Amino acid sequence: MEDLAQTFEYLKQFLTEERLSKIEHFSKESSDFVLPVMDDVYQFRNAAAIIRSVEACAFHKVIAMEEENVFDPNLTVTKGAETWVEVEKMAKNIASLQNIKDRGYKILAVSLEKNAVMLPDYQITEPIALVFGTEMEGVSEEVIDFADETLAIPMYGLTRSYNVSVAAGICMYELKQKLIHSGIDYKLSEEKKMKMKIRWAINSMRSGKQIFEKYLRDHNLEM
């Protein structure tokens, strides 16, 4: 933790006061208690809208499982949210979901199948990974079978599904509200928060990655 703090202290000199103030302020609310998992999303506008909604709710990580499609957000839609949200890419398979589960997440497939719990009724008590399916086919049967539970958003009209980016936005907002009123300690640990602040600082700087890597080399550090 001390190395992380010293690294961030070093990087602060390259930030404007405005950017540093923004990092300090918004990092306090950041959480990885809800982890969005995108299952081979292929429309770049949807990818961008998902990133934007995730960041707006202060969940600052997304996992993109890729097979046929590359998760490549349209930067004109993200409105800068890609600076703050970490995208971890994995192969589209059950092994990747098991990896996520091994990190302590309960796997929830967003689907009407398998006696789904409706979002307003869902009680969040532990970290959850929400798996959103492809635009055309939704969540695959394989993922639904592997998931611990399924979660669905109520619909009141003739349309039987939401656009994937809309579904992600609704889920992120509703689950954020549930966490705020739950009494659960859902925010990042001090170590995770410091790592995120370092990543935000790097992304805020011109040649940030090179400056960071040189600092690590000069101080014989690994992160």
Image (cartoon, rainbow, N blue to C red):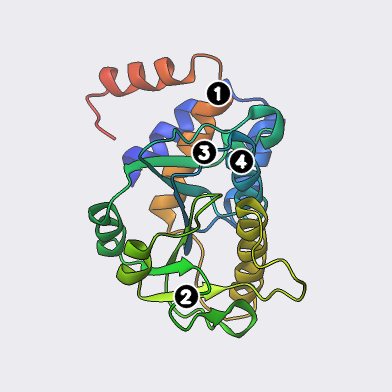
Note whether residue 34 is visible: yes
Quickly name the residue at label 3: 42
Residue 74, position in %: x, y?
63, 30
62 vs 74, left or right, is left
Foreground tag (1 vs 4): 4
Question: Quick one: label 1, few (<14), some, or many (20+) residues within 10 Å?
Answer: few
Dot label at residue 23: 4
Q: Look at the numbered disc 4 and give the secondary structure of its residue.
A: helix
Q: Which quadrant of the figure has residue 171?
A: bottom right
Dot label at residue 13: 1
Q: Look at the numbered disc 1 and give the secondary structure of its residue.
A: helix
Point out the tag, 3 or 1, that comes first from the N-terminus.
Answer: 1
151 vs 24, left or right, is left
Q: Look at the numbered disc 2 and give the secondary structure of its residue.
A: loop
Foreground tag (3 vs 1): 3
Dot label at residue 37: none
Quickly name the residue at label 2: 113
Residue 153, position in %: x, y?
63, 72
The amino acid beneath tag 2 is Glu
Point out the tag, 4 or 2, that comes first from the N-terminus.
Answer: 4
Q: Rounded to the nearest whole Å, what is the CA distance between mark 1 and mark 2?
A: 52 Å
Point out the tag, 3 or 2, that comes first from the N-terminus.
Answer: 3
